[in-house]
């Protein structure tokens, strides 16, 4: 779910971020989303650029309401639309990461991000191979086989909604249309859910 944020910051930070957005032909929200793709954990390692200092204010002319036409002083701010659940310091760190990447050689930064993504994908493939159930040589023949394929202990008695929830979760991992899918394991998942469905009262 998306949310509109008003993030207080220093005028120097605001100017640097808005200048980068202008040069890149992007929105402030777009810059923050790019930083999310680079890695929230990388942004969390950066120092928060911080709120505006005491004398750091911007002047704006009010356009609406009873005070229309008057000038008001307020803290500099950035307005963005991003996923719900972020704090102002977290958003400032994301934008600081995006600025830091821009200051470096863009190609080197991109190559580093690609290398990290490939390493993470390799880790996920290895973890999935370790956690995947062993194929049953004769297929799924009994309810006990079906529970095994769906990842339930042999003594478990999951109800039909629990069986379907587990089936859907495993389908997202093993469906052959997904990257790294496994047709043989998907076939046994289908056999397992069908067998348990026939056994249901």
Image (cartoon, rainbow, N blue to C red):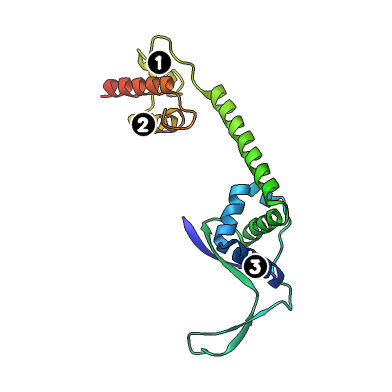
Q: Residue at x 59, y 26 (%)?
A: 126
Q: Residues within 10 Å of mark 1 (few under 14, many from 20)?
A: many
Between marks 3 and 1 in the image, the one whose residue lies nearer the viewer: 3
Q: Residues within 10 Å of mark 3 (few under 14, many from 20)?
A: few
Pick the residue in front: 22 or 168.
Answer: 22
Considering the numbered disc 1 on the image, is that residue within a helix, a strand or a loop? helix
Query: Residue 56 location in percent, x, y?
Result: 72, 76
Where is the C terminus found, in terms of image quarters? top left
Considering only order in the chain, which callout, 1 or 3, is on the residue closer to the N terminus?
A: 3
State the residue lying farthest toward the top: 138
Considering only order in the chain, which callout, 2 or 1, is on the residue closer to the N terminus?
A: 1
Considering the numbered disc 3 on the image, is that residue within a helix, a strand or a loop? helix
Q: Residue at x 60, y 64 (%)?
A: 21
Q: Residue at x 60, y 59 (%)?
A: 87
**Which residue is disc 3 drawn over?**
19
**Which residue is disc 1 drawn over?**
145
Q: Residue at x 43, y 13 (%)?
A: 136
Query: Residue 128 location in percent, x, y?
Result: 54, 27
Pick the residue in front: 113 or 3.
Answer: 113
- Say left or right for 13 vs 150: right
Place residue 26 in its image quadrant. Answer: bottom right
Considering the numbered disc 2 on the image, is that residue within a helix, a strand or a loop? helix
Alpha-carbon span between mark 3 and mark 1: 61 Å
Alpha-carbon span between mark 2 and mark 3: 51 Å
Q: Residues within 10 Å of mark 2 (few under 14, many from 20)?
A: some
Considering only order in the chain, which callout, 3 or 2, is on the residue closer to the N terminus?
A: 3
Query: Residue 67 location in percent, x, y?
Result: 52, 89
- Say left or right for 170 vs 97: left
Place residue 162 in its image quadrant. Answer: top left
**Which residue is disc 2 drawn over?**
164
């Amino acid at each position: 779910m998306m949310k509109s944020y008003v993030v207080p910051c220093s005028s120097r930070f605001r100017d640097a971020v808005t200048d980068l957005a202008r040069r890149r032909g992007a929105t402030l929200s777009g810059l923050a989303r790019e930083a999310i793709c680079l890695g929230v954990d990388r942004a969390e390692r950066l120092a928060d650029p911080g709120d505006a200092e005491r004398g750091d204010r911007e002047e704006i002319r009010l356009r609406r309401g009873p005070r229309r036409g008057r000038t008001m002083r307020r803290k500099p701010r950035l307005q963005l639309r991003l996923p719900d659940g972020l704090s102002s310091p977290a958003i400032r760190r994301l934008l600081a990461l995006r600025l830091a990447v821009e200051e470096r050689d863009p190609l080197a930064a991109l190559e580093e991000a690609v290398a990290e993504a490939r390493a993470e994908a390799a880790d996920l493939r290895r973890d999935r191979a370790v956690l995947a159930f062993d194929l049953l040589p004769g297929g799924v023949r009994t309810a006990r086989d079906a529970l095994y394929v769906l990842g339930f202990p042999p003594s478990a008695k999951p109800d039909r909604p629990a069986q379907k929830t587990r089936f859907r979760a495993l389908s997202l991992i093993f469906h052959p249309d997904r990257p790294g899918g496994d047709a043989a394991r998907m076939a046994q998942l289908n056999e397992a859910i069908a067998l348990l469905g026939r056994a249901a009262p």
